[in-house]
């Protein structure tokens, strides 16, 4: 393996850290590396062409008071593939907040578990305000470059999908809604080249929805009025519609009036799902009521006759009982999908009757579901989700759900080995939905190393077809994406894909 050190962040974290989400599989990294001629066990498929991109929350400074794993600075990992060879990079996202805190040598903003009034900096980002936009939640491809985003709304940072150089912020030709920002989970529609997005905040109308076209023009941006501030995390789309949500887990209004941001579940309030024509207006929004729940992530949506079919992870217990324990155990029960009871679920929104029917698709708790992105907005059959060990925000295995038959296949990484959100990479020239590969990065606590694993998506139980050793054990994190080489700017013009800047 040929390794080059690209950079190193200034860190002030304690040498003997005891925070559960800054140690073990969540141990953050400070060094940025490029690696080629990687050691491979098995064979990298020659028809795997593109880059697996994974965002992580990677802190470099202690929090003001209490660190929450969603506070960490965005660090993106890339494993790129062409002609049966792989390369690797990891880089911090040069957000305004990261740069300012590198200069200051300490945390300048209060995190999610902290009182914003204690934030050392009065300005900031996020629906709550006075937060650092770490851009550490999600990563998607749009117009040939990677866009990273933040769950509480912020800028979209543009990164080269191959070198991971931060290219600046999305401006959308001067129309980017900088006053509110954009939430994590904007959706890229490969079919039209559009990016669909939403944002939310504490001021009416509380949510907006928009569309950016393949020339980076903001072509739709509308109010989505809600009864009050909400905490949406994800959206979905079909060929003709966008689906947003107003779910009964939100900041308690009375506490909010006193500047306290405490999320409460309102079990007697229906979940509401908004169906909006893709380029529609506020007057076109139709709301559907469903079983009270919180949904962190949707897998997909599509149209079938007069119905919008929506699939995602219904939580049976969005606010699990605290059950005592340490401060960390109480805080982080919200990160354990087993306690939240997130299970694959289907909602059918009937555009004729205005009614919603729903059904559980799997009894197995799972979350972070991915599909073949070529099927986004169209009827899909397969999704690939993560299972979690009790008590932790970690992924101990993958599950392939078949939404047609209700069947599932599982693969467990093994004791002490944790994967990342697994992206589906269609094989070059593929014609079937699951004709491709699943790509994930492990954090192996037994051997203190990370590997990139490649599975045949048609048979995940057979185990990986290739294991690629990475230069350092990678910290756990949240979201990933598959960037097909055919959609990366400049990819085909370079003999060496690792040198593609993606401008
Ligand atoms: Fe997310």
Image (cartoon, rainbow, N blue to C red):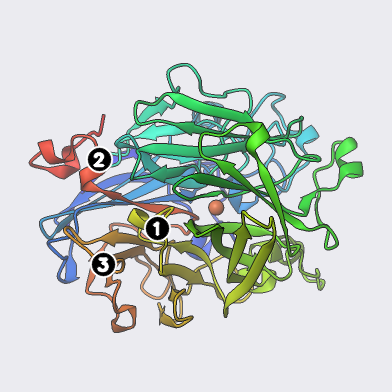
Residue 488's disc is 2
| Comparing labels 2 and 3, the label whose residue is closer to the camera | 3
Q: Which residue is mark 3?
A: 432
Q: Give residue 164's position: percent from left, percent from top.
A: 32, 39
Q: Give residue 467's position: percent from left, percent from top.
A: 24, 70
Label 2 vs 1, first from the N-terminus: 1
Please, what secondary structure does the residue beneath circle 1 have? loop
Between the residue at mark 2 and the residue at mark 1, the CA separation in whole angstroms equals 24 Å
- Please tell me whether residue 462 is drawn above or below residue 252 in the rendered image: below
Residue at 26%, 29% in the rendered image: 503
Which quarter shows the N terminus? bottom left
- Please tell me whether residue 87 is drawn above or below residue 359 in the rendered image: above
Please, what secondary structure does the residue beneath circle 2 have? loop
Residue 474's disc is 1
In the foreground, 174 or 19: 174
Q: Give residue 251's position: percent from left, percent from top.
A: 80, 46
Instruction: Place residue 100 in its image quadrant.
Output: top right
Determine crowd level at label 3: few under 14, some 14-19, many 20+ residues with C-alpha closer than 10 A: few
Does the beta carbon at disc 2 come under 8 Å from ligand 1? no
Label 3 vs 1, first from the N-terminus: 3
Residue at 63%, 55% in the rendered image: 352
């Amino acid at each position: 393996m040929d390794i080059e050190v690209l950079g190193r962040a200034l860190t002030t974290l304690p040498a003997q850290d005891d925070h559960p989400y800054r140690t073990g599989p969540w141990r953050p990294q400070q060094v940025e590396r490029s690696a080629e001629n990687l050691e491979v066990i098995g064979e990298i498929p020659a028809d795997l062409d593109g880059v697996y991109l994974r965002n992580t929350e990677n802190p470099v400074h202690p929090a003001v008071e209490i660190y929450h794993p969603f506070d960490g600075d965005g660090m993106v990992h890339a494993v790129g593939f062409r002609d049966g060879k792989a390369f690797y990079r990891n880089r911090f996202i040069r957000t305004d907040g990261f740069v300012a805190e590198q200069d200051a040598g300490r945390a300048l903003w209060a995190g999610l578990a902290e009182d914003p009034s204690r934030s050392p900096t009065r300005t900031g980002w996020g629906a709550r305000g006075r937060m650092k936009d770490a851009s550490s939640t999600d990563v998607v491809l749009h117009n040939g470059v990677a866009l990273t985003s933040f769950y509480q709304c912020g800028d979209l940072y543009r990164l080269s999908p191959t070198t991971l150089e931060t290219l600046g912020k999305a401006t959308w030709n001067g129309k980017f809604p900088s006053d509110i920002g954009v939430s994590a989970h904007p959706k890229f529609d490969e079919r039209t080249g559009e990016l669909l997005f939403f944002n939310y905040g504490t001021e009416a109308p509380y949510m907006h929805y928009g569309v950016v076209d393949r020339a980076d023009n903001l072509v739709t941006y509308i109010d989505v009025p809600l009864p009050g501030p909400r905490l949406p995390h994800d959206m979905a789309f079909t060929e003709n519609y966008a689906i947003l949500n107003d779910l009964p887990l939100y900041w308690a209004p009375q506490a909010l009036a006193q500047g306290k941001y405490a999320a409460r579940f309102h079990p007697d309030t229906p979940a509401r799902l908004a169906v909006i024509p893709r380029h529609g207006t506020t007057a076109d929004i139709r709301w559907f009521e469903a079983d009270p729940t919180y949904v962190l992530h949707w897998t997909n949506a599509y149209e079938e006759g007069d119905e919008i079919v929506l699939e995602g992870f219904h939580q049976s217990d969005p606010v699990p009982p605290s059950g005592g324990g340490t401060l960390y155990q109480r805080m982080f029960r919200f990160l354990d999908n087993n306690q939240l009871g997130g299970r694959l679920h289907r909602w059918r929104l009937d555009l004729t009757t205005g009614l919603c029917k729903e059904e559980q698709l799997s009894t197995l708790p799972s979350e972070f579901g991915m599909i073949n992105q070529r099927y986004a907005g169209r009827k899909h059959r397969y999704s690939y989700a993560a299972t979690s060990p009790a008590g932790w925000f970690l992924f101990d295995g993958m599950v392939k759900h078949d939404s047609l038959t209700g069947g599932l296949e599982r693969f467990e990484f093994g004791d002490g080995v944790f994967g990342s959100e697994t992206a589906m990479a269609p094989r070059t020239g593929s014609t079937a939905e699951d004709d491709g590969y699943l790509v994930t990065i492990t954090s192996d606590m037994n051997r203190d190393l990370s590997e990139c694993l490649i599975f045949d998506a048609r048979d995940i139980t057979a185990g990986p077809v290739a294991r690629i050793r990475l230069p350092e054990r990678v910290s756990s994190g949240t979201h990933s994406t598959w960037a097909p080489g055919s959609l990366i700017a400049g990819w085909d013009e370079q003999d060496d894909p690792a040198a593609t800047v993606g401008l």
